[in-house]
């Protein structure tokens, strides 16, 4: 799980300064598990052909196509991620050639390119309604709160690999294969409990989504684990977090956690060095970059990484991902955001495998609500169930699990999956 997803200023492939993505959204982009380094980002395969597998014979879709909308961040002045669309298109090719598409019919992807602003997001949502698509998928977006009311309001199912916006957590007709930020916080709390920690200091970039999520979602699950969680906000873009870190260290936390972009992680890690902090560290994917490792040498070593997926290990799902990408979009690198589009579309095809009869928004919705133990694409053995049982209070989230690994520099080792469902149970 090198630093290949969660790009931010200074890193490659389309995310530039002033990006409209919320820190929370980028924090949860699935990880690519691997090793090595490549200049602007860390870790990784040299391309989509590494360690692939042979695809067994399957069932080819036939008949009239099923229109599935796909809204992707592409072409904007701040954010442009064509690889997300390419990952979705690769998943469509695989599903149509080997999985019988949806209901035996081929998937036709109806793409709308949002520029990651409210106006273009609204335009894309309305276009999906006008096109009368059967369902709408998104890869990575910070504008779920704009998209969901229009799409779900038109009774069109809305699906995503990783929910980031509040409306994507509990709205009827919305389905997120992973548990998003809640699951990340829950698996952090589970790890802290396993280690016997009493207090964790969580350093969060001071943006509303991240701060609200950390307090409203993080504190309860940590408390249920018997762990106190201190949430410390760091102004966005701050170069020096020494005063905040010094104050937090004064409360003698057993572990230090970071949620934010690479700039945030660099600032906080440097402050850890300045005050001589030796506590174990929890990080999310944007922290795991060569730039961070160079700026704060040694700080990533031994840190625990929490992330929704794995694309570069020897796990069968990771190998399948690389194989599908190599076959259908061979020029797309597998070590970036492409997995978000792939995960969304292939997850939909897998969850609808049992759909019989007419394929409509209503039949898709009912089939998704009945989906149980579906293999998570690029999920390192994780599964998802969309019956509302994963996190009952956040019924749109289909999983409460996450991938966890120990870092050696920017290389992930000891990869495993963790289920935090018990922390979200009532009582």
Image: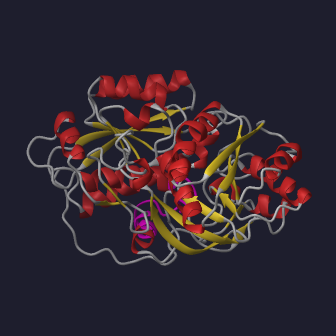
Q: Nearer the viewer, residue 113 or 412?
A: 412
* Residue 115 shown in magenta: no
In the current view of this chain or complex, which residue is farthest to the right? 274
On the rendered image, what quadrant is the C terminus found in?
top left
Q: Is residue 407 above or below residue 66?
A: below
Residue 115 at x, y percent in the picture:
56, 31
Residue at 54 percent of width and 67 percent of height: 194
Question: Magenta stretch: residue 326 in it?
Answer: yes
Identify the residue at image location x=48%, y=56%.
339
Q: In the image, which residues are magenta? A: 321-338
* Picture quadrant of residue 419: bottom left
Q: Residue at x 52, y 60 (%)?
A: 190
**Position in image of residue 237 (x %, y %):** 80, 39
Q: Is residue 409 left or right of residue 419?
A: right
* Residue 5 located left or right of residue 424: right
* The quarter of the displayed image where residue 80 is located: top right
Q: Quadrant of residue 421?
A: bottom left
Residue 16 visible in this rendered orientation of the protein: no
Q: Residue furthest left?
A: 357
Residue 410 visible in the picture: yes
Please provide percent x and percent y for residue 400: 42, 53
| Front-lying residue, 314 or 359 | 314
Q: Nearer the viewer, residue 89 or 170?
A: 170
């Amino acid at each position: 799980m090198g630093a290949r997803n969660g790009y931010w200023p200074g890193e490659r492939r389309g995310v530039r300064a002033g990006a409209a993505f919320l820190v929370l959204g980028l924090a949860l982009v699935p990880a690519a598990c691997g090793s090595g380094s490549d200049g602007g980002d860390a870790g990784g395969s040299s391309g989509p052909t590494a360690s692939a597998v042979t695809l067994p014979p399957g069932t080819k879709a036939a008949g009239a196509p099923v229109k599935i909308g796909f809204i992707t961040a592409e072409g904007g002045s701040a954010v442009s991620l064509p690889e997300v669309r390419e990952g979705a298109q690769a998943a469509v090719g695989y599903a149509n050639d080997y999985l019988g598409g949806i209901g035996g019919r081929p998937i036709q992807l109806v793409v709308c390119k949002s520029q990651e602003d409210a106006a273009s997001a609204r335009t894309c949502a309305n276009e999906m309604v006008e096109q009368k698509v059967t369902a709408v998928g998104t890869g990575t977006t910070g504008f779920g709160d704009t998209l969901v009311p229009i799409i779900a309001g038109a009774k069109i199912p809305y699906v995503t690999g990783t929910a980031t916006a509040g409306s994507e957590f509990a709205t009827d007709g919305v389905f997120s294969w992973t548990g998003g930020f809640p699951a990340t916080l829950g698996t952090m709390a589970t790890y802290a409990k396993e280690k016997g920690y009493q207090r964790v200091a969580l350093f969060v970039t001071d943006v509303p989504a991240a701060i609200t999520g950390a307090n409203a979602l993080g504190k309860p699950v940590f408390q249920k684990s018997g762990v106190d969680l201190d949430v410390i906000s760091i102004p966005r873009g701050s170069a020096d977090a020494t005063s905040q870190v010094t104050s937090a260290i004064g409360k003698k936390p057993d572990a230090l956690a970071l949620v934010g972009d690479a700039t945030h992680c660099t600032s906080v890690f440097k402050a850890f060095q300045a005050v001589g902090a030796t506590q174990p560290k929890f990080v999310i994917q944007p922290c795991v970059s060569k730039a961070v490792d160079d700026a704060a040498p040694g700080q990533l070593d031994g840190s625990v990484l929490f992330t929704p997926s794995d694309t570069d290990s020897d796990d069968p799902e990771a190998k399948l991902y690389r194989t599908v990408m190599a076959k259908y979009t061979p020029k797309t690198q597998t070590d970036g955001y492409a997995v978000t589009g792939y995960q969304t579309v292939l997850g939909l095809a897998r969850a609808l495998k049992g759909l019989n009869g007419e394929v409509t928004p209503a039949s898709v919705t009912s089939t998704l609500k009945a989906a149980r133990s579906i293999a998570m694409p690029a999920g390192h053995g994780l599964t998802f169930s969309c019956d509302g049982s994963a996190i009952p209070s956040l019924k749109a989230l289909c999983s409460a699990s996450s991938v966890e690994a120990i870092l050696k520099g920017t290389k992930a080792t000891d990869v495993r999956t963790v289920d935090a469902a018990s922390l979200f149970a009532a009582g």
